[in-house]
Image (tube, rainbow, N blue to C red):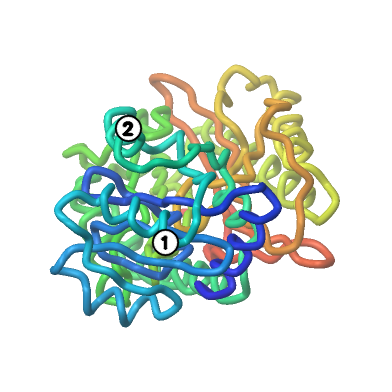
Amino acid sequence: MTRTALARFQERLTAEGLDGALIAAPEALSSTNLRYLSGFTGSSAYLLITPAHAWLLTDFRYLEQARIESPAYDVIRQGKRVADTVADLCQSAHVARLGFEADKVPYAMWKGWRERIPVIWRPLNQLVEKLRVVKSDEEIQYIRQAAHIADEALREVLPTAVGRSERDLALALEWAMRRRGAESLAFDTIVAAGERGAWPHARPSDRIIQPGELLTIDFGAQFHGYKSDETVTVATGSLSPELRRLVEIVAEAQAEGIEAVRPGNTARAVDAAARAVIEKAGYAEAFGHGTGHGVGLDIHEAPYASPDPANDVTLEPGMTLTVEPGIYLPGVGGCRLEDTLVITETGAERLTEWPKTFQILG
């Protein structure tokens, strides 16, 4: 996968009129783009890529690891001043126009580069991110496995939820995912019971999960660097008519959104399909976030399904997209249902497994 990603990036450099690009991820930064292009998983490295060659610069700690993980690159031990090493390589490779990630590199770092590396600097303008939007079969398989790990873990711990604290349930879910092969959490798990379900990004607390309320869990695992993302909302017993109706509306909205996920349709149309159901039910003001986003090496990636025209893109096979409508009522509770899908040639495939039908624990 990384060789293909590197080759595609090198082709784009030529198309953009660049002699090379510098992708930086010292320990002060953390670049999923660097991992995407090289496969390197260490915490500090730089990539210098030209249309014909690629170097990975790192320190003594990671030299052997880099040679194994990044066979498409010449691995070089960086000098005391990385900029001097890059300058020497640029001179030997006749790099005059060098791209860099202007949206990620701190100004002070770039200022130091500019003083020591005699090139014409050009912003890459999300060039790597644009390549990452369409996933390879290997990437999709990693996301699918991450989702499977997460769902198997949820099946283990969810029946034990009532009577536990939100925090305890979140820890149990994390341990169950790790025992099944997760490298880490995809993101900090959200567990929100009862009235705390009105907080879309509630941190797990010491609140005890009670019978007869809604419980929302937003969770994911990481596998080979790739993440899963899923939200379930279940009942912990008999619910009031208002809360039961809330789940029914969100489930209908999610189903309509999923139906709209297909090649040739737009991400904004997916948002509109889900949002229309919630607006018709009278809860427009209670759904204040976008309907979905891509998932991959980052938990939030393009494309984004939202009402904002600036985010709109046409869906293509290989893109991933979550569909996660929700309704949040302060003092009452909330409901969100989320699946991660991959767009196929004919429609979409659900990568997350947990059924989004109404469920009562026990």
Q: Residue at x 34, y 39 (%)?
A: 192
Q: Amino acid at mark 2?
A: Pro
Q: Helix or strand or loop: what does disc 1 sit on?
A: helix
Lower sequence index among marks 2 and 1 = 1
Q: Amino acid at mark 1?
A: Ser
x and y percentages locating residue 296 in the rendered image: 50, 58
Q: Which mark is residue 140?
A: none
Q: Which mark is residue 92?
A: 1
The one nearer the camera, 20 or 176, is 20
> Taking 332 as reference, is 130 left or right?
right
x and y percentages locating residue 233 in the rendered image: 47, 47
Q: Helix or strand or loop: what does disc 2 sit on?
A: loop
The one nearer the camera, 105 or 57, is 57
The one nearer the camera, 308 or 176, is 308
> Taking 339 as reference, is 176 left or right?
left
On-image quarter of the N terminus? bottom right
Q: Are marks 2 and 1 in contact (CB under 8 Å)?
A: no
Q: Which mark is residue 106?
A: 2
> Taking 345 as reference, is 98 left or right?
left
Q: Nearer the viewer, mark 2 or mark 1?
A: 1
Distance from Cα at disc 2 to Cα at disc 1: 27 Å
x and y percentages locating residue 235 in the rendered image: 44, 47
x and y percentages locating residue 301 in the rendered image: 53, 47
Using the rendered view, name the quadrant where residue 356 is placed: bottom right
